Image (cartoon, helix red, strand yellow):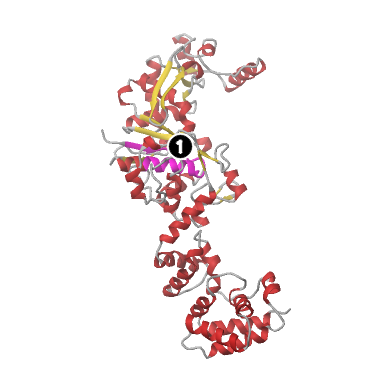
Amino acid sequence: MQVRVRFAPSPTGPLHIGGLRTALYNFLFARKHKGTFILRIEDTDQTRFVPGAEEYIIESLKWCGLYYDEGPGVGGPYAPYRQSERKNIYREYADKLVTSGNAYLAFDTPEEIESLRKTAEADGRVFQYDYSVRINLKNSLTLSETETKRLIEKGTPYVIRFKIPENKTIEANDLIRGSVSFPSSILDDKVLFKADGLPTYHLANVVDDYLMKITHVIRGEEWLPSLPLHILLYKAFGWEESMPQFAHLPLILKPGGQGKLSKRDGDKSGFPVFPLQWKDPFNEEISAGYRETGYLPAAVVNILALLGWNPGSEKEIFSLDELVEAFSIDRVSKSGARFDPEKARWFNQQYIKQKSDCELADLFITELTKKGIKADIDYVESVVNLIKERVILLNDLWEQSYFFFIAPEKYNAETIKKVWKTETPGLLEDIASVLENAEPFNQTVIENAIKKYAEEHQTGMGKIMNPLRLLLVGGSFGPHLTDIMALLGKEEVIKRIRYGIKAIKV
């Protein structure tokens, strides 16, 4: 049987990196087994629909290179792949369950359900709509066929609930967790079809997985409590032989290890929890994304792959193709994986180091263009070559090199206090004159000329180089100073020195 897996998010907001990891593991599993990776948008709950969320999900997958074989915008033999466009399918299957006695029509109003819930709470009980409750309520199990028909014809709103069997144990073999079992007493009669004419997640999910011939359901741990209901649905439909194998992935935990990683954790500690920046369409609140923060997509994929999966070796850096080759579901952990923001930065740094100067320059020149800076690609490559080892995030390219493109007009006050002495302006004016005669204007000639001046005037190199760096870059940072000078060029260096001498007043 050909492997067919699906990533089935709901468009209720931005895609969390936990969801992105679920998509990644499905993708890796499909590619490993030469199967099919499907994207299905589960948007049956229109009350939670968020404009732009579906587009965000698709863009996130594409940014990470997780291209799906079937889905929105791609099509496929089981189209459409948005559940809202498949809504006419589900009623037929809900009715089949009613006819077979596995589901029933419930006419309870929301107010009646809420009253039952409050009564249970007052008695110190947790309300559960199950076999002990349904026998006393208004539904097609307790009403006559005539009365049920009358209520339907009258237009009385109703839902279709699944009839959980009494005193049963539901067993399954999870590909990650092994044998799991659930007593039916912990399950409630879930709504399968709502009064608004739309199915709930449970019905639509199972029906679509069956119709799309899904062979493996790889999803987050939070869906494990839904597993017994889904197994019961397969059995009720008579689809037990076609039921997919299930694998429930461990949670991605907070950096401290306690609890599921949330947006609040990222906001608090200054790291993203979403692949791309997200602007909330309702309150316009902006949430950071890995792309905009300066991460390479390959690094993000590598980070997520190792959050819950062990390759069985000490190897840490994997290309996507290498991940496909190495991935196996039986090496996915049962326990949660702690997210380490510093380790994530380290991964990105390794990927940046692997990039050629040309590749980084291409990325950087796009950002320079956005800033209105026109620069020759060869010049940008030279800049990248000097700062590459200092860069952790792509955004650091600008932070570490802006002085190559814009002359400083302000100077770091703390650095001025440390390096600017009474004799400094005279020294630097002399250096400007020395540099005017330096030919060719390269790193070796510049360094030798300054050293010769220092020796002849019995002046320490620090008294020259530290304030000189201040005038050229605006502070006490950057790569080797003579490399900076050689790249800036003689005219620009002398111009900055003489501007700075006049600008700094101590």
Location of the N terminus by quadrant is: top left
Farthest left residue in view: 1
Helix, strand or loop under label 1: loop
Q: Is residue 49 left or right of residue 98?
A: right
Q: Nearer the viewer, residue 497 or 8?
A: 497
Label 1: how many residues lie within 10 Å, few (<14), some (14-19) or many (20+)?
many
Magenta stretch: give its range. Answer: 4-27
Q: Residue at x 37, y 37 (%)?
A: 6
**Is residue 446 placed above or below 103 in the rendered structure?**
below
Q: Position of residue 482 (x, y in %)?
A: 52, 78
**Is residue 366 placed above or below 189 in the rendered structure?**
below
Q: Nearer the viewer, residue 172 or 214?
A: 172
Note whether residue 458 is visible: yes
Q: Position of residue 196 (x, y in %)?
A: 49, 28
Q: Position of residue 437 (x, y in %)?
A: 52, 91
**Is residue 158 placed above or below 454 in the rendered structure?**
above
Q: Position of residue 328 (x, y in %)?
A: 35, 39
Q: Residue at x 45, y 72 (%)?
A: 380
Note whether residue 200 is visible: no
Q: Which residue is mark 1?
A: 43
**Is residue 366 placed above or below 32 in the rendered structure?**
below
Q: Residue at x 60, y 49 (%)?
A: 269
Location of the C terminus by quadrant is: bottom right
